[in-house]
Image (tube, rainbow, N blue to C red):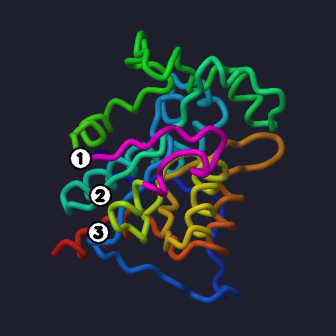
Amino acid sequence: MKDTKSAARPEYQDPAEPGLPSVDMEIDLARTALVVTDPQIDFLSETGVTWGVVGESVTENGTVDNIERLFAAAKEAGLPVFISPHYYYPHDHGWKFEGALEKTMHDIGMFDRKDPLDLTDFEGSGPDWMPQYKKYIQDGETVVCSPHKVYSPAQNDLNLQLRKRGIDKVILAGMSANLCTQAHLYELLELGYEVAVVRDATAGAKVPEGDGYLAAIINFRFVANGLWWTEDAVRRIKAAAS
């Protein structure tokens, strides 16, 4: 893992005199989990199909290394880890209507798999995990949920898996900031979870319509129970385990 403290960061700065109250979330190892959305090649690797629009933000934030720092800290502390992945199968391409990003994802073959059970040519493909994360995800302890299909976990089993383990606090990271990560935040809040978002363990697309990451950071500040840097999140996780 690389030291990301000196990594360039986007232009957004917290206001000197914020208009919103300061809130925070305490980590209780018995009730808290790390949830990572879409830690997959198509989002986080230079070989992924979205790198042309997300690569700058991923690089600025040190997102790849920061997600790994969270994985490592969680595993060392015994903090449960949950993955909410994104997969599309051939039948998903039969949808009769789509939003702009859904259409884009389907058009570029993002997260495409041949079949829910067929892993032919899956290794190293776009929907596969980033290679450096596999030792954390495939350790026999991490919970890999069923895939979410649009953005939020409304259609997968993340809520069930968390509730069955008595989890009601979530440290949220992953891709991408203003899409799946933000949608997971909103859904989890509506379901009664406390959620702290790790602001530099995510990233977003930069397109002519705007910077998805900066849009998400503003919304995170409005609604999340905590908005942490990776360095702070790792410190808190270690402190909770000591």
Mark 3 lies on residue? 237
Label 1 secondary element: loop
The single residue placed furthest to the left in the displayed view is: 242
Alpha carbons under labels 2 and 1: distance apart: 8 Å
Asked if residue 147 lies left or right of residue 133, the reply is: right
126 falls in the magenta region: no
Q: Which is more toward the observer, 108 or 114?
A: 114
Identity of the amino acid at label 2? Pro
Label 2 secondary element: loop
Mark 1 lies on residue? 141
Mark 2 lies on residue? 80
Q: Residues within 10 Å of mark 1 (few under 14, many from 20)?
A: few
Alpha carbons under labels 1 and 3: distance apart: 18 Å
Of the numbered discs 2 and 3, the one sitting upstream in the chain is 2
Q: Which is more toward the observer, 155 or 34?
A: 155
Identity of the amino acid at label 3? Ile
Residue drawn at (26%, 42%), measured in percent from left and top? 136
Asked if residue 170 lies left or right of residue 208, the reply is: left
Residue 240: percent from the left, percent from the top?
24, 75
Alpha carbons under labels 2 and 3: distance apart: 11 Å
Q: Are marks 2 and 1 in contact (CB under 8 Å)?
A: yes
Magenta span: 142-160
158 falls in the magenta region: yes
Residue 163: percent from the left, percent from the top?
41, 63
- 1 vs 3, front mark: 1
Identity of the amino acid at label 1? Glu
Q: Which is more toward the observer, 186 or 125?
A: 186
